Image (cartoon, rainbow, N blue to C red):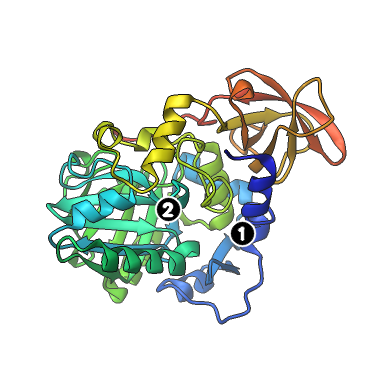
Amino acid sequence: MMNVARVQRSKVAGSALRRLYSTESEPLAKTVYHDFHIAHGGKMVPYAGFDMPVLYKGQTHIESHNWVRNKAGMFDVSHMFQHRFSGPGATKLLEKLTPGDLQGLQPFTSTLSVLLNEKGGIIDDTIVTKHGEDDFYVVTNAGCREKDLKFFEDAIANFGQGNVKRETINGGLVALQGPQAAEVLQKLTNYDLSTIKFGQSAFVDIVGGKYHVARGGYTGEDGFEVSITDDKAAIDFANKLMDFDGIVKPIGLAARDSLRLEAGMCLYGYELNEDISPVEAALTWVIGKRRRAEGDFNGADNILKQIAEKKGNLRCGIISEGPAARDGTEVYAPNDQSKPIGVITSGSLSPTLKKNISMAYLPRSFAKKDTDVQVKVRGKFRNAKVVKMPFVAPNYYK
């Protein structure tokens, strides 16, 4: 069972923004868009082993955040780890490593999932897109790159059922996010993007080639993630987006973090780690009905037991008074300040709601909507309340 001390020990120290400014002892990798960022005034910081833009000249964090909520923002997410799994047995392998129903997934549809260790803890969160029978496009986190690679290599070596091949997909990966994203992207292709709904994808003619376009993202807004495997075409695509002056701006990691928090989305190393199960993370819905019945994925015994017993802590949303409750802030029962009942994993002032929002792991008895709690910020106890997530309603195209 998860407890407060375990979360505090296992999660990455510091807030999400402080993490962006962490120092790196080894040379930083650069995405294909590195020169593009410099040319557009990107303030570069070390992030997950890469030199990445946190902000751009002439934009504050709040302005960048609000721009995406109202227009369209271009995010460089090329640091994410893109894979292709193919060959006989690819479905069986991925269904051992994740709890999703990949057999039942329709071609060119995707699902949020998690990579599981043998105890049911989360090695990483991931998006799995099915392209065809035993053919999958998988995206994992940059910060887990080496760990994930070893996990996949070991899993393939030990699987012994079919000839499964994993390939790394290189090039540019752009997330175009915001209510005007579809309008902009449609002007760069003859493909009817209205036929691609949230969670679907297609290979689309764009900037002189056919590239993978998936409808979705990490902001709660409508948008697309475009994977362009040719470096020259990737740069061409970014430059064409900048031609939509007054609609599209390049956006950095600071706004990406606050947007995902408003959308109630997890950040690995904060809400998720190898000691937390998908049940505790309020991600039980990623476990397919058939998968629960068959129970043949990593950590299934522990996970199915948690589902049946309905015990342990849960990830939940909190709105609090006073200064923002950042990650590491202790959460207390309303009438007991003797010991904490939980800990904030991510938190900040919401630019959209103008309220302090955060996520925390709390006992189930406190994780119900409208339950009063307290947070201890700057040595003082502040009133807080558990709320339903997402904090800001999503704007997906379905």
Q: Residue 349, image x and y in percent?
A: 67, 39
Q: What SS does tag 2 mark?
A: loop
Q: Is residue 335 left or right of residue 255?
A: right
Q: Residues within 10 Å of mark 1 (few under 14, many from 20)?
A: few
Q: Nearer the viewer, residue 9 or 320?
A: 9
- Kindly report the distance in space between the C-alpha atoms of the residues bearing marks 2 and 1: 44 Å
Disc 1 marks which residue?
A: 58
Residue found 50% across the figure and 63% down from its top: 143
At label 1, which amino acid type do we have?
Answer: Gly
Q: Residues within 10 Å of mark 2 (few under 14, many from 20)?
A: many
At label 2, which amino acid type do we have?
Answer: Asn
Query: Residue 312 has which mark?
Result: none
Disc 2 marks which residue?
A: 117
Q: What SS does tag 1 mark?
A: loop
Residue found 49% across the figure and 25% down from its top: 310
Mark in front: 2 vs 1: 2
Q: Earlier in the sequence, mark 2 or mark 1?
A: 1
Q: Is residue 90 above or below residue 316?
A: below
Res 348 visible: no
Q: Nearer the viewer, residue 10 or 224?
A: 10
Q: Is residue 334 left or right of residue 9?
A: right
Res 25 visible: yes
Q: Residue 337, image x and y in percent?
A: 83, 28
Residue found 20% across the figure and 63% down from its top: 160
Q: Residue furthest bottom?
A: 27
